[in-house]
Amino acid sequence: MTYRCEISSSIDDVNVEDWEAVRTADRNPFVERGFVRAVERSMRDPGWFRYAILYDESDAPVAVACFALFDVDGALLAPKFVQSFTRGMRKVFRRFMRLRMLLCGLPVSVSGSNLAVVPGADWDRISATLLELAEKLARESKAVLISFKEFTPDLAERLQGLERAGYYRGNSIVTYLLEEDCSSFEEYYNSRSKRTRANMRKYFRNLEDANISWESRSGGGAGFSDLYTDEVHQLYEQVFERAEIKFEHVPPEFFRELALQCPEASRFTIFSQEGNVVGFCAALTSKHTYDMLYCGFDYGISEQSSLYFNILYRGVEDGYNQGLREMYIGASSDEFKRRLGCRGVALSVFVKGVGIITGGIFKLVAPLMFPKLDSKPVQESSETER
């Protein structure tokens, strides 16, 4: 038995009262309408977006979900030998392993999903409704794969109905969570080991010696669109090009829209040298969390100035200054993030081929396209410095 659902093709067309009722109850910042609108307006090509509100028998909203149609790299999360083979094949067949995928989610990598559910909802019915809706949208759009992304371990367990329906569960990304019981950055600093405090002082001194200043501000501050130029965006491009696993490629319009659509919830920590921006971190805040979404910096000056380390530490400071104690420090694997005091949280995806033939082929290649799910949780590094 499924829930009744209403579908909209733009976040501006959803029933605002019902959407907000679910979002507020679930506390998921990644279904906040401003954030969703920023993604929709900046990353539309070459796909489309759909938004669903699920209702129970009394017409009370019980869940909201985002869907997106996008072309993805089928070898994105595959082992290196598969990626190498794919690159070779693309020299002959340009679109080899480039697949049209229907996402239950948005085409940005964050620390959670774009699904929100009110307490007490029937998760089996939620799963059944989303499955039925996803398969309908996939057929209409001629998608070859359906992916539900990215779920924390507790939510993944609640969505076991997806596995029973034949979806392959695999690893997506590991996000790093800092949740120290500190009320300020000073208290956080004092909680670190003597060695870590000495390193922090060195990083801060290196930044000062390089004549680099920094500030944290909300996206709603005056002149952000003028500040975030195409030249500043090249700092993000430097980080993207060096990433071992390249997820979505975010255009400069995303950061401008994030500031515009989330004027208070968006936060930007900006580093400048002689009037030029040389590094930044973009974050999304809620009443409970601080999520560092993307960063960019000049690799040419980072080593001597410790710019990368300063970006993370000052982002943490901004989170504490906003009164938040639960902070997500990005999704790339990084030993330094563990030394910050973070623990890794493995996120899951559920993927299935559309149709009998594609579905059968996908079952055979799924272990190559997606790493096998590790039954053990990601642990905090033994080198985490207190």
Image (cartoon, rainbow, N blue to C red):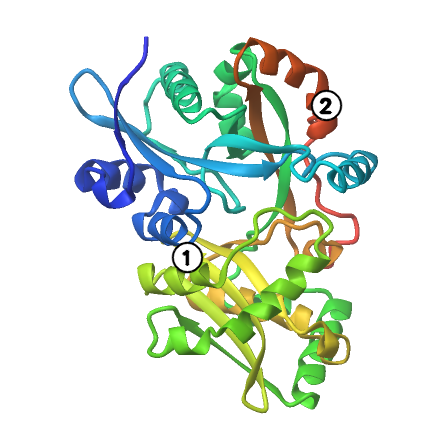
Q: Where in the figure is residue 367, as x and y percent of width and height?
A: 72, 23
In the displayed structure image, the side of residue 318 where residue 340 appears, left or right: right
305 to the left or right of 274: right
Question: What percent of the width, then of the height, locates residue 342?
Answer: 64, 52
Picture quarter with the C terminus:
bottom right
Q: Residue at x 79, y 48 (%)?
A: 382
Is residue 313 visible in the rendered structure shown here? no
- Which amino acid type corresponds to the residue marked 1 in the rendered image? Thr
Which residue in the rendered view is the most extreme toward the right? 81
Residue 2 in which image quadrant: top left
Residue at image mark 2: 367
Q: Residue at x 65, y 44 (%)?
A: 344
Q: Is residue 216 above or below residue 149?
A: below
Pick whichever of labels 1 and 2 is earlier in the sequence. Answer: 1
Q: Residue at x 81, y 35 (%)?
A: 85
Q: Is residue 324 visible?
A: yes
